[in-house]
Amino acid sequence: MKDFKNVMIFDHPLIRHKVAILRDKNTGMKDFRQLIEEITTLMAYESLKDVPTKEVEVETPLEVCTQTKIVEKSIALVPILRAGLGMVNGIHTLLPTAKVGHIGMYRNEETAEPVPYYCKLPEGIQNMKVILLDPMLATGGSACDAIKKLKDLGCKDITLMSIIGAPEGVEKVATTHPDVKLFLSTLDRQLNENFYILPGLGDAGDRLYGTK
Ligand code: PRP
Ligand code: URA
């Protein structure tokens, strides 16, 4: 895959270690959920480097000094249902007051085209930094639709965080939306004939919620 300026792929042993356990078909629902959260928290350190900040006065036991704090209410987390929900706590652990919007979408099993079914977003989202969350970026159809919806509403600062991506999906997001920053913990090899990621981890929603 060619290099894209707006795509950052993590290369960290802690993340690689956790992704290896996540992929394992013998990893159960509880551990799977916990790993998705932990990987998201690790990714957040880099992905949230450009969050809005403000200067504040802090009184230490010795003197008053000027410090930097995050403007937490200026951040909206937007998970794509269902699997994106599993990533929310991974960021809420660090930024408990970040607002959360939800975009519901599932893939048509034959065409892999996304079918939208729900959308509820925080008021004023167009002025916030939006972090779109979905652990799986396969064809890129769901992510591109969600990004388009956010842009149609006026959002200008959008970051997509995904745990595993296929080259097809990464290229689609990176070329259709070069202004969107994409953070990926791992780039996988390819999609199979059913548009599943190889080697991947199977169906993230089913593994998070035990539906299969
Ligand atoms: C999965 C995943 C993404 C989408 C990725 O959701 O969570 O939203 O597929 O595929 P794409 O890049 O080809 O669009 P799915 O449709 O399985 O719904 P679910 O989360 O409710 O299981
Ligand atoms: N959605 C998933 O959950 N897994 C894939 O491999 C592709 C789409």
Image (cartoon, rainbow, N blue to C red):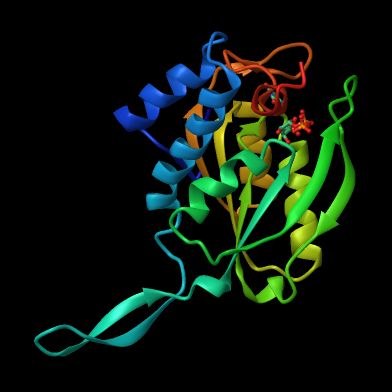
Q: Residue at x 56, y 25 (%)?
A: 30
Q: Is residue 130 above or below residue 135?
A: below
Tally of marks? 0
Q: Residue at x 39, y 60 (%)?
A: 49
Q: Residue at x 52, y 55 (%)?
A: 92
- Ligand 2 is found in which quarter of the picture? top right
Q: Nearer the viewer, residue 178 or 107?
A: 107
Q: Residue at x 66, y 43 (%)?
A: 85
Asked if residue 176 can be seen in this view, the reply is: yes
Q: Tell me if 68 is positioned left or right of 100 in this view.
A: left
| Image coords of residue 91 (percent x, y) | 50, 52
Q: Which residue reaches farthest left?
A: 62
Q: Tell me if 75 is positioned left or right of 172 in this view.
A: left
Q: Nearer the viewer, residue 147 or 42?
A: 42
Q: Tell me if 13 is positioned left or right of 181 in this view.
A: left
Picture quadrant of residue 124: bottom right
Q: Nearer the viewer, residue 94 or 145?
A: 94
Q: Is residue 103 above or below residue 134?
A: below
Asked if residue 3 can be seen in this view, the reply is: no
| Image coords of residue 148 (percent x, y) | 78, 55
| Image coords of residue 196 (percent x, y) | 71, 18
Quarter holding the C terminus is: top right
Q: Which residue reaches farthest top?
A: 26
